[in-house]
Image (cartoon, grey):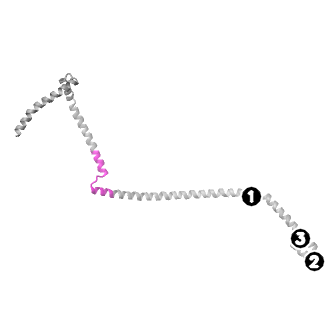
Amino acid sequence: MVKKLQKISDDKKAAPQLASAVKDSAQQIWLAGLGAFSKAQEEGSKVFDTLVKEGLSIQRKTQAAAEEKITEATSKMSGMASDIQSKAGNRWDKLENIFEERVAKALGKLGVPSARDVSALAERVDQLDKHIQTLNGRAAAARAPARPAAKTAVKTRTPQAAPPAAKKAARPAVKRAAKKVAGPATDTAQGTAE
């Protein structure tokens, strides 16, 4: 088209032709632009849909890759954490043992019994308690026949219980008799002491 315009411009006689050529050229450019716009509108929605589909597939691929990397990193971190925890746990156990030993030494110097001493003492007390119970059981078995006989003897001495009023009346008489018996004894004790 530029060559065509150059030919026409060389010819000065062709000025009206130049104007019509420019007009035709502008018309063709305008129509080409409208055609491109129309084509872009028709194919634009198709291109947009295609781009959306490609974007979804790329997003899925990147998410899968990211999840895989996250899973891998998580497993590595948990492995490292368990290693660190076991190392720290071992050192903590060592520190705890050292502390317990030093406290035990200090308590031993002060004369405080250890847990083993207390448990041994508790076992010994349990054994002695069982032994005492067996001895009490034997002694009770040996005394058991004598007790019923003593109870029957007490019951035979007091065949009938005195009524409460008789008991109250008997108390002063018993006290007076005790004083009479105690009186001369105390006098003789005082006389011998002087």
**Residue position for label 3:** 22
The tag on residue 60 is none
**Residue position for label 2:** 12
Name the residue nearer the viewer: 154 or 77: 154
Q: Residue 136 location in percent, x, y?
A: 23, 36
Instruction: From the viewer's perspective, tell me whether residue 80 is left or right of residue 171.
Output: right
Dots 3 and 1: beta carbons under 8 Å?
Answer: no
Q: Earlier in the sequence, mark 2 or mark 1?
A: 2
76 w.r.t. 1: above or below:
above
The tag on residue 48 is 1
Which span is picked out in magenta?
A: 102-124
Q: Earlier in the sequence, mark 3 or mark 2?
A: 2
Circle 2 Cα neighbour tier, 10 Å, few/some/many (<14 / 14–19 / ≥20) = few
Q: How many marks?
A: 3
**Residue at (10%, 30%) from the top-left corner?**
180
The amino acid pointed to by label 2 is Lys
